Image (cartoon, coloured by chain):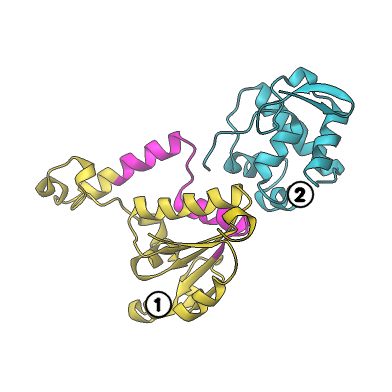
Amino acid sequence: MSEDNGAIKKMMIILSKGTLENVYAAFVLANGARMEGIEAEIFFTFFGLEAVHKKKLEHLHVATVGNPAMHMPTMLGGLPGMEALASSMMKKEMEKIDMPDVHEFLDILTASGVKLWACKLAMDMFHYKKEDLYEGVDAVITVGDFYKQSQGEGVHMLFV
Amino acid sequence: MEKIIAGKNITVNEEGYLTDFSQWDEQVGEALAAEANVPLSARHWEILKYLQNEQKNQVALSIRRIGKSGVTDIKEFYQLFPNAPLKTATKIAGIPKPASCI
């Protein structure tokens, strides 16, 4: 334990997936940190970039295939429309517990002071431009920049 | 447990939240705010009154609701009550800590 009894001062969250359940996990963790007075930043990489891509962020789905916790036979989960059905059911349940949609959640995060970074390598790979992204994204940065951003006491890093 | 706040004997829980809102008054609010290093302005009071009203109506408080309150927005809320705004503001307002993750 170092200073302050190991108190958490900043959460650096790396989001590498674009499925709804993973995006929400990262967002809830970042927002929850801010609510506790902890700083938070999210680094969007690979499919995680979809969560901040203007045209895609409203159309994220839950994974129905390869997700045993869905309790759905894999073959059934692969049928056309299954993902959309499962996603719309999940979105309805989320609205019931006062969970915002992805766009509103991004607005809440930026208003709360969460920094949003897009991974340069993944941006190049998917041929995305900064203007394709949600306007609250602070900048497109490299892994090295992200590590620099993570320096300091009480900083924790989390990979989703 | 009992704690002396603004010269009064007040019942609080282990985190310092009032357990009986009838013991709250504006002096108690001022004292709790001073403890949290939040000097109260007229804007703070508007928000505290809003929170108390929501609590009275048994509305579950969350950051999202604050944003939609029409009283303040999330950015200003974080500026007025830096460091854990919902936790700090509810403590000053003398109402329970919201058990919300959003």
Q: Please tell me which residue is depicted at 23% across the width and 43% down the height of the picture.
A: A69
Helix, strand or loop at mark 1: helix
Helix, strand or loop at mark 2: helix
Front-most of residues B76 and A25: A25
Question: Is residue A43 visible to us here?
Answer: yes
Drawing shade for chain B:
cyan
Q: Which residue is mark 1?
A: A123
Q: Please tell me which residue is depicted at 46% across the width and 35% down the height of the picture.
A: A97
How many marks are shown on the rendered structure?
2
Question: Magenta span has A90?
Answer: yes
Give percent across and percent down for residue A61: 31, 53
Q: Please tell me which residue is depicted at 85% across the width and 43% down the height of the picture.
A: B40
Q: Residue furthest left?
A: A75
Badge 1: chain ID: A
Q: Which residue is mark 2?
A: B80
Question: Magenta span has B31?
Answer: no
Give percent across and percent down for residue A101: 46, 48
Give percent across and percent down for residue B82: 72, 51
Q: Characterize the local packing of mark 2: few (<14), some (14-19) or many (20 or more) Cα atoms within 10 angstroms.
A: some
Question: Is residue B70 visible to us here?
Answer: no
Give percent across and percent down for residue B46: 79, 37
Chain depicted in yellow: A
Front-most of residues B70 and A49: A49
Magenta highlight range: A87-115
**Amino acid type at image mark 2:** Leu
**Amino acid type at image mark 1:** Met
Q: Please say if A80 is above or below A55.
A: above
Quadrant including the C terminus of chain A: bottom left
Q: Main secondary structure of the magenta part?
A: helix
Q: Is residue A68 left or right of residue A31?
A: left
Badge 2: chain ID: B
| Quadrant in the rendering for residue A132 | bottom left
